[in-house]
Image: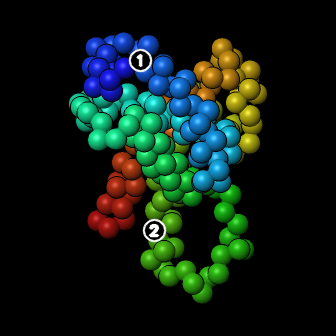
Amino acid sequence: MDEAVIIEEIKNGNNNQLAMIYREYRSEFIAWITTNYSCSRDEARDVYQVSILTLHENILNNKLQQFQSSIKTYLFAIGKNKFLEFKKSDAHISRDTDIATIDLEEVSSWDYEEKELKLQATEKSLKKLGDPCKSLLELYYFHGMSMDKIARRLSYKNRATAKNLKCKCLVRLRKIFTEELEKVKLDNNG
């Protein structure tokens, strides 16, 4: 089917087209990103889900009216960018940093202040995020729990439901974090 027709179908609410895209490229995407970006299969699946959601949002919001390349190329580009965003964000959110491994001579006072501001913003963001997102993300990132265990523990229908919610929670957390970081910076400068 012509890609312009697929875009129109999705705009008109035909989720079958989106599901077809999802199924068609999922395995290839996961293999590609795990090989080229050294991520786990779970991370690859999460990135793929967010990439599909982003593709869908871009179509619905008229950010994407026609493809300059193929759907596959566009989707994989979104995936690459989302993966790099996740990795960058994980570095900001991680509480597992071992202070002893940081060479203090290399860390300027500005770096320290910036990290402190980000830590404050992270703590405020997690509090503001609330449940069930806060619990789900803590179980996954801080306790290393699998999606299957999280689904059982939080009484979700299945692993896919838990993963879908995790993706939505991450998007929400990033938005809150950005807002909180700006507030913290303003409070400390003013």
Cα distance, mark 2 to mark 1?
A: 44 Å
Going by the numbered disc 2, the residue's amino acid type is Glu
Q: How is the image coloured?
A: rainbow
The quadrant the N terminus occupies is top left
- Of badges 2 and 1, nearer the viewer stands 1
Residue 68 lies left or right of residue 144; in this view the side is left
Residue 178 lies left or right of residue 103; in this view the side is left
- Dot 1: what SS? helix
Q: Is 74 in front, or is 109?
A: 74
The quadrant the C terminus occupies is bottom left
Can you give x and y, in whole percent of width and height, for residue 54 in the image?
A: 40, 34
- Asked if the residues shown at circle 2 and circle 1 are in contact, with their CB atoms under 8 angstroms apart, the answer is no
Can you give x and y, in whole percent of width and height, for residue 78 in the image?
A: 43, 43
Who's the residue at 43% across and 30% down the image? 53
Who's the residue at 51% across and 73% down the image? 112
Please say whether residue 163 is visible from this viewpoint: yes
Going by the numbered disc 1, the residue's amino acid type is Gln
Can you give x and y, in whole percent of width and height, for residue 10 in the image?
A: 33, 19
Who's the residue at 76% across and 27% down the image? 149
- Dot 2: what SS? helix
Which residue, given by chain and number where applicable, does mark 1 sit on?
17
Query: Which image quadrant for residue 65?
Result: top left
In this view, 185 is above or below 179: below
Q: Is 3 in front, or is 136?
A: 3
Residue 44 lies left or right of residue 100; in this view the side is left
Which residue, given by chain and number where applicable, does mark 2 sit on?
114
**Residue reaching furthest bottom?**
105
Precedes in sequence: disc 2 or disc 1: 1
